[in-house]
Image: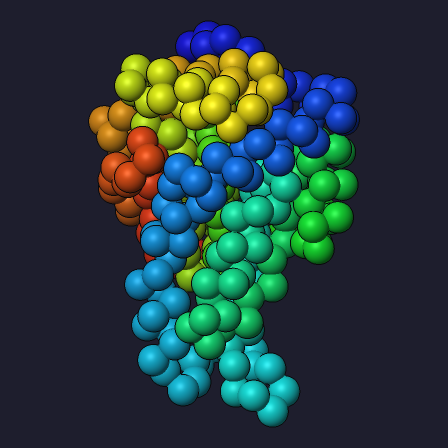
Amino acid sequence: MKMIGTELLDDRRADPRAVTNELRDIARLNALFGGTRAVIGALMPLFRSAGRRETLKDSLTVAGGGMPRWTLLDVGAGSGDIALAVTAAAARHGIALTPICLEVIPAAAQLARGNGVAVVLGDGGALPFAPKSVDIVIVSQVLHHLPRAVAMRWIAGCDRMARRAVVLADLRRSRLAMAGVWLAAHALRMNATTRHDAVVSLRRGYTRVELNAMLREAGVPAIARYRPGFRIVATWEPCAPSTRS
């Protein structure tokens, strides 16, 4: 299927200054209109459950503190804003989360690194980590940049890598949301590229039926759900290595 429209972040060689400006705008939109909350909300049951336990059998602990230490991989992390917000939410539940951002766009990697997040340059289609080597994997607002077949490979790859949870968060396609985000970006004095790309992103967004079909074909046990702010989220506990061919 042909991709709808074009966006600045589709191009790995896009102008670094333009990439930085757009990612800062996206971080503002995430904070204001539900992108950040969608990911944190999906992980809250896991954080609350872990926070109620004094120890977790297979966790590393912070020396002297007894605090579970987990790792988080944010695939296509942009500025690292969501990874940092998730890390703060985990800390409120007694979990020391170490965030790692995976980025294929050098300017995005530089921005995330400048925001204090460890960054690995790499592609979500060829994840440079061993199976079951990361506790939590999140992919937020990235799948709509990919052809369907590639997106499904990303989904399966995240399932193979994660130990505790995978969160896929993206945009729900909606004409109302397209109009709303254009007006909001204009009111917030975001640049013309951001306004254009925000609308294209929503045109590329998913319905529950579409994302559920992709999840099934990727072989993961998840159901997509709508969330406020025209978001769509799927989260699941990854399959054990022995159950995947």
At x 66%, y 19%, the residue is: 11
Up/down of 189 relative to 233, above or below: above
Q: Is residue 193 left or right of residue 1?
A: right
Can residue 152 be seen?
yes
Q: Is residue 144 left or right of residue 73?
A: left
Image coordinates for residue 7, horizontal then vertical, percent:
57, 16
At x 49%, y 57%, the residue is: 86
Up/down of 60 relative to 191, above or below: below
Image coordinates for residue 72, horizontal then vertical, percent:
55, 57
Q: Nearer the viewer, residue 229 or 139?
A: 229
Image coordinates for residue 213, horizontal then vertical, percent:
28, 29
Residue 214 falls in image quadrant:
top left
User: Split into 4 quadrants, where in the image is the N terminus?
Assistant: top left
At x 57%, y 24%, the residue is: 190
Image coordinates for residue 192, horizontal then vertical, percent:
58, 14
Can residue 134 be seen?
no
Residue that lies at the very extreme toward the bottom in this rendered image: 64
Q: Nearer the viewer, residue 123 or 179?
A: 179
Residue 110 falls in image quadrant:
top right
Q: Is residue 82 left or right of residue 119?
A: left
Q: Nearer the viewer, residue 123 or 180?
A: 180
At x 67%, y 29%, the residue is: 21
